[in-house]
Image (cartoon, helix red, strand yellow):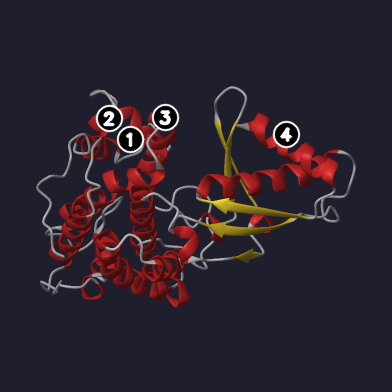
Amino acid sequence: PIADIEAAVAAVRESGADVLISVGGGSPIDAAKAVAYHLHKNDVNSGQDKQEAKWISSIAVPTTMSVAETTKNAGFTSADGTKTAVADRELVPKAVLYDGDIALHTPLRLWLSSAIRALDHAIELLYSPSAPEIPTKRLALSALTDLFTLLPQCHANPQDADIRQRLLLAGYAALFPFQFSGALGLSHGIGHAIGSTYGIPHGITSCISLGKVIGFMAERAKGTDGGKGIGEVGEAAQVARAVPFIPGLRSAGDVAKDALLVAEAVEGLVTKLGLATGLTDYNVKPGEEEAIAIRALRDPAHPDLEAVTELVRTMYSTSSDATTRL
């Protein structure tokens, strides 16, 4: 909330602090960024030249895999309840400390669901038109192997600090060094649309949306050699690249079929980790589908609105029939 951000800004001013340290998941790390943003904004508003006004540095100690520590984005809730987003390269923490022993204090369900968010980052980066092949997409592909390998191990051995340490680094690889504003892809767009509105944690939004979105793209790519809009064959082909990086999968020699294999692997992993859930579990009433789709697409006249509305409708139920491939 903006009131807490303003209180923190006042405390920093009063103490004369010259660095911010955030420990925790995406919320405290984003809060530190928001404090830094408002400190700088207040300096500019008080008459300092925007180019000369200094930014306070921050150090992040993540305890989840939200990877907020790698991005220039931050969000906070305004006085009227509206979610406000800000972005600046200066908001990226100057140092990040990844420590598996500290991460052991994170409750398992929160930890695992944040890892599915990292998986969401890696897969949606593959079809992002602005993400470079090297190093971003190559790192994302390597992160997929680590995530699919290590997450079942972590689920079985939740007190193993080494596994958590390796997962933190996999999460870092899943999004580094790509800087972006807004939603990364359709799964993130839907996640933003349902998260704050219905009080669904970010990691859980990815558990609900990611597998379904990949399946949607795979279905739209069937029997096509081109296509426009969400799910065109080019996007499905990028997702299909993940097949050889996911343990146990073998290419079917067809873009749509391979993308569907990835979708099934994601839903299988979510189920194996005990994270399968749906919108109904969070009291989202039937009939909200179009509103969610409009928020996700950010355009009430989007040509894919009807298709995405139908996609959202499939997210009400739990994916209990997902194929467990691990």
Q: What element carries label 4?
A: helix
Identify the disc placed on residue 7: 4
Q: Nearer the viewer, residue 289 or 284?
A: 284
Residue carrying label 3: 197
Q: Distance between the residues labelled 4 and 2?
A: 38 Å
* Position of residue 203 in the picture relative to residue 273 (left or right): right
Q: How far apart are marks 1 and 4 (CA)?
A: 36 Å
Q: Which of 88 and 130 is in front in this view?
A: 88
Tell me which amino acid carries mark 4.
Ala
Tell me which amino acid carries mark 1.
Ala
* Position of residue 137 in the picture relative to residue 88 (left or right): left
Residue carrying label 1: 293
Q: In which quarter of the image is the N terminus?
A: top right
Q: What element carries label 1?
A: helix
Q: Distance between the residues labelled 1 and 2?
A: 6 Å
Q: Is mark 3 on a helix, strand or loop?
A: helix
- Rate crowding at label 1 as few (under 14), some (14 to 19) or many (20 or more) other CA atoms within 10 Å: many
Q: How far apart are marks 3 and 4 (CA)?
A: 25 Å
